[in-house]
Image (cartoon, rainbow, N blue to C red):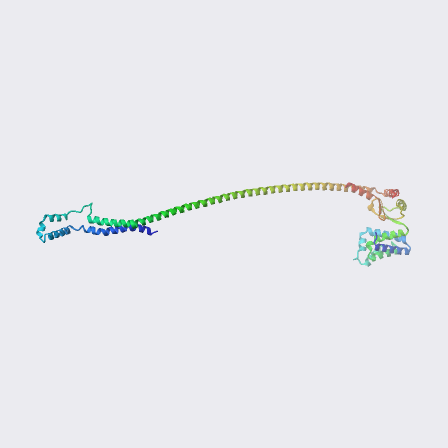
């Protein structure tokens, strides 16, 4: 991943190096005015077969020397520069077409692929998340249903327990009432029986005392005689 | 009613009394002693208690009967007490009297009354019983204050109750 920027930078760097290297010969043609004049004057002397005087006064030579004072055109380069520059451009262009463009295109495609893959991944993650979310929602729904069911069930159970307790309490209360009534009735009957027994005992005690006090010798004799008559009369 | 031992003792008493020739007096004395024995808890528990030495029990009998009963009666009671049959003495005496009466072709009527019957009343009662049941009876009177008044007659298992006590009991039942 890290070498991709380096590869992208490699093409312009290479172009710059080539440009600098090829610029050297171009600028070599732009030599100094003195050098130019000396070179041209030497060429004129040689053309005049060594006659320096002639050469120095020849107008054609002077015009040639004056040309050395003319500045180069600010727009049009020297012919040799055009040639070198064009060559360098061509070389650079070919290099860019052959090497730089595929590299850049590859990097772009790789990047596009990666982005696409990332997008796909993101879509997939989103789908997964939605699936998980729907799953959670379904589970949440189930849990709510279950909780609701449990609450209803607990409520039903509680209602049943309450009804049972009330029924039992009512039964107990009824039993207690019945027992209390029965005990009360029994106590009443017992009290009446006790009272009757007491009254009878008192009455009998009184009767016995009356009988005893009234039993004198005559009465005893009469009772015995009456008994004898009774036995005699009973024809058993 | 009476088991073999009671019957055996009764017959022995009868044989001895008959041999001694004072059967009637022995009957009366034994009957009186049996009544005293029945009604006196202390006497009964002393004579029937096996833990009291025999000599002490015989001494009690001797003290009680000395001068009040014939020698035969004393000897017979002493025999029953000495053999440890004191608890069965009343039953033995009853059996003896019945046996004795039976020897004269009579039954025994035990009469309970609050007061003693006169001889006339006894005779009339015996006659009345004969009329009513067809049995010749000898009257044995037991004075029992709990009867209050009137008479209760027992002949064997038959009871003729004409007592004031029975009437009071009937009154008590009617209250329930």
Quadrant location, the C terminus of chain A: top right
Q: On the picture, is B67 further left or further right than A97?
A: right
Is residue A110 rendered to the left or right of residue B40?
Answer: left
Q: Residue A13: image x %, image y %?
A: 27, 51
Q: Against B171, is A50 above or below?
A: below
Q: Is residue B62 visible?
A: no
* Image position, residue A111 (x, y; %): 35, 48
Q: Which one is in front, B150 or B130?
A: B130
Is any atom of residue A105 visible in this view?
Answer: yes
Residue B58 rendering spot, x and y as whole percentages: 83, 57
Q: Is residue A69 above or below residue B53?
A: above
The residue shown at (85%, 57%) is B79
Determine whether, in the image, residue A40 is placed left or right of residue B99. Answer: left
At a point 81% along the width and 58% down the height, the residue shown is B54
Residue A80: % across, % down: 20, 49
Residue placed most toward the observer, A47 or B102: A47
- Residue situated in front as seen by the camera: A113 or B146: A113
Q: What count of labels does the image hold?
A: 0
Which residue: 82% across, 51% down? B38
Would residue A193 appear left or right of B155 to someone viewing this image?
Answer: left
What residue appears at the point 21 percent right and 49 percent down from the top-left corner?
Answer: A83
């Amino acid at each position: 991943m890290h070498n991709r920027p380096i590869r992208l930078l490699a093409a312009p760097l290479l172009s710059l190096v080539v440009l600098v290297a090829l610029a050297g010969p171009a600028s070599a043609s732009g030599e100094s005015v003195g050098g130019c004049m000396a070179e041209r004057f030497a060429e004129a002397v040689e053309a005049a077969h060594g006659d320096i005087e002639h050469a120095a006064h020849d107008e054609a030579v002077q015009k040639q020397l004056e040309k050395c004072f003319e500045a180069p055109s600010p727009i049009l380069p020297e012919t040799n520069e055009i040639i070198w520059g064009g060559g360098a451009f061509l070389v650079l262009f070919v290099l860019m077409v052959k090497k730089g463009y595929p590299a850049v295109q590859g990097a772009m495609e790789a990047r596009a692929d990666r982005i696409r893959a990332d997008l796909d991944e993101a879509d997939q993650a989103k789908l997964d998340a939605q699936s998980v979310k729907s799953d959670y929602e379904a589970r949440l729904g189930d849990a709510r249903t279950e909780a609701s069911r449990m609450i209803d069930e607990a409520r039903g159970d509680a209602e049943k327990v309450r009804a049972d307790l009330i029924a039992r309490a009512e039964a107990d209360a009824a039993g207690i009432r019945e027992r209390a009534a029965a005990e009360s009735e029994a106590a009443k009957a017992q009290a009446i029986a006790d009272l009757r027994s007491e009254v009878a005992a008192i009455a009998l005690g009184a009767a016995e005392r009356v009988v005893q006090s009234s039993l004198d010798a005559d009465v005893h004799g009469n009772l015995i005689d009456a008994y004898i008559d009774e036995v005699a009369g009973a024809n058993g | 009613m009476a088991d073999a031992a009671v019957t055996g003792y009764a017959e022995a008493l009868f044989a001895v009394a008959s041999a001694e020739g004072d059967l009637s007096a022995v009957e009366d004395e034994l009957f009186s002693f049996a009544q005293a024995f029945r009604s006196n808890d202390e006497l009964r528990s002393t004579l029937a208690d096996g833990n009291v030495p025999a000599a002490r029990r015989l001494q009690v009998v001797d003290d009680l009967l000395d001068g009040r009963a014939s020698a035969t009666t004393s000897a017979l009671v002493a025999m029953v007490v000495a053999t440890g049959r004191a608890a069965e003495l009343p039953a033995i005496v009853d059996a003896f009297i019945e046996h004795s009466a039976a020897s004269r072709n009579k039954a025994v009527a035990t009469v309970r009354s609050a007061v003693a019957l006169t001889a006339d009343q006894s005779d009339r009662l015996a006659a009345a019983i004969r009329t009513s049941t067809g049995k010749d009876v000898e009257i044995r009177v037991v004075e029992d204050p709990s009867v209050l008044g009137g008479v209760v007659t027992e002949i064997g298992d038959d009871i003729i109750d004409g007592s004031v006590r029975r009437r009071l009991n009937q009154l008590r039942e009617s209250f329930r």
